[in-house]
Image (cartoon, helix red, strand yellow):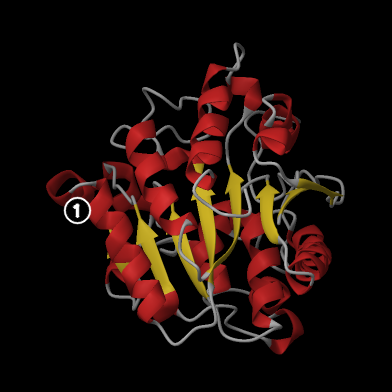
């Protein structure tokens, strides 16, 4: 049975303006407002509340809200683990991408698992000048790097379980690059990693169906016990999804995302899913959130437990 769990954490993002918290903390409430619980015929698994957002750097971990995220990841992992242990398929409503640490830690505690990563960014490449970002790195923009073992112990090695997922057991769909990305980050690190990559250029040349089938085939062939699905709303093109902190000028359409997500969710090895980064504060008429909800519901309609 599908179980919807709220994880309204914005700890992995920097403030959009002075003394203002990122609005992704309202994602779960917005999607519930669009009827996602009933439309998925899901059980209400409640919520895991994050600690308060802290403005200012954290020198010890190097990441904004580092201590808070460490605590939150442990608690979210425990709740996701409870759902997995009772045969539920968790659908986790974020939140920013840093909530990924919770589910992947939960799975790592139970064995060896994989990850399907749908995102307009690689969330892996390190900053070229880390000293300039000391204490102010954002876990939302480094979530894939952290779960594959790259980062401080407080985030990437909870319980001594680094890495939570091996790079070769990850399939990434939808990354696109802009000029400033090359200036800020060492993109070669991602390109030379063992992560299976289906960038936007692959989607444009071969189609969304081929990318989805390739990602699923890679994960189903891997020596893993199952995989988690991560969806960042910024994998969508800014023309249809402007309500994100970093709008995507070359992203997927809703039709393409529906195709990719449907293929992955239908896999018998898919064990759970989360969605993040959609910001209701940037979507005053709610249209982008409604379309995102429709896409998730459509993708899950093929599952026997939906």
Question: 136 left or right of 106?
Answer: left
Task: Give the answer, above or below, for where 141 lies relative to 224.
Answer: above
In depth, the one of 273 and 265 nearer the eye is 265
Q: Residue furthest top?
A: 285
Question: 227 left or right of 17?
Answer: left
Residue at image mark 1: 202
Q: Residue furthest left?
A: 205
Q: x and y percent of residue 269 in the render?
A: 51, 71
Tell me how many marks there are: 1
Q: x and y percent of residue 174 in the render?
A: 33, 50
In depth, the one of 257 and 95 nearer the eye is 257
Locate residue 85: give its quadrant: bottom right
Residue at 76% in and 84% down? 159
Task: Give the answer, above or below, for where 180 lies relative to 18.
Answer: below
Q: Can residue 244 be seen?
A: no
In depth, the one of 170 and 32 nearer the eye is 32
Q: Secondary structure at mark 1?
A: helix
Locate residue 279: give its quadrant: top right
Question: 125 left or right of 209?
Answer: right
Q: Can residue 101 be seen?
A: yes
- Dot 1 surroundings within 10 Å: few (below 14), some, or many (20 or more)? some
Residue at 78% in and 62% down? 76
Q: x and y percent of residue 142 in the render?
A: 53, 60
Q: Quadrant of the N terminus?
A: bottom right
Task: Give the answer, above or below, for where 154 lies relative to 39.
Answer: below
């Amino acid at each position: 049975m599908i179980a919807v769990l709220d994880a309204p954490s914005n700890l992995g993002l920097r403030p959009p303006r002075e003394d203002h918290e990122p609005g992704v903390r309202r994602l779960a409430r917005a999607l519930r407002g669009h009827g996602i619980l009933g439309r998925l015929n899901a059980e209400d698994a409640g919520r895991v509340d994050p600690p308060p957002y802290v403005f200012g750097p954290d020198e010890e971990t190097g990441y904004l809200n580092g201590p808070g995220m460490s605590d939150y990841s442990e608690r979210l992992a425990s709740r996701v683990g409870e759902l997995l242990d009772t045969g539920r398929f968790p659908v986790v409503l974020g939140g920013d991408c840093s909530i990924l640490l919770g589910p992947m830690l939960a799975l790592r505690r139970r064995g060896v698992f994989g990850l399907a990563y749908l995102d307009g960014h690689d969330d892996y490449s390190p900053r070229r000048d880390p000293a300039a970002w000391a204490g102010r790195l954002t876990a939302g923009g480094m979530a894939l790097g952290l779960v594959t073992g790259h980062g401080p112990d407080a985030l990437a090695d909870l319980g001594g379980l680094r890495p939570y997922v091996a790079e070769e057991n990850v399939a990434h769909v939808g990354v696109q690059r802009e000029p400033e990305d090359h200036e800020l980050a060492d993109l070669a690190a991602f390109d030379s990693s063992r992560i299976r990559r289906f960038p936007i250029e692959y989607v444009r040349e071969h189609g969304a169906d081929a990318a989805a089938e390739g990602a699923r085939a890679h994960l189903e062939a891997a020596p893993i016990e199952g995989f988690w699905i991560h969806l960042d709303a910024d994998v969508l093109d800014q023309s249809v999804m402007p309500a994100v902190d970093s709008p995507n000028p070359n992203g997927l359409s809703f039709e393409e995302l529906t195709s990719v997500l449907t293929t992955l969710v239908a896999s018998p090895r898919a064990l759970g899913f989360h969605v993040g980064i959609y910001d209701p504060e940037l979507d005053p008429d709610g249209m982008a959130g409604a379309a995102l909800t429709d896409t998730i519901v459509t993708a899950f309609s093929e599952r026997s437990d939906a």
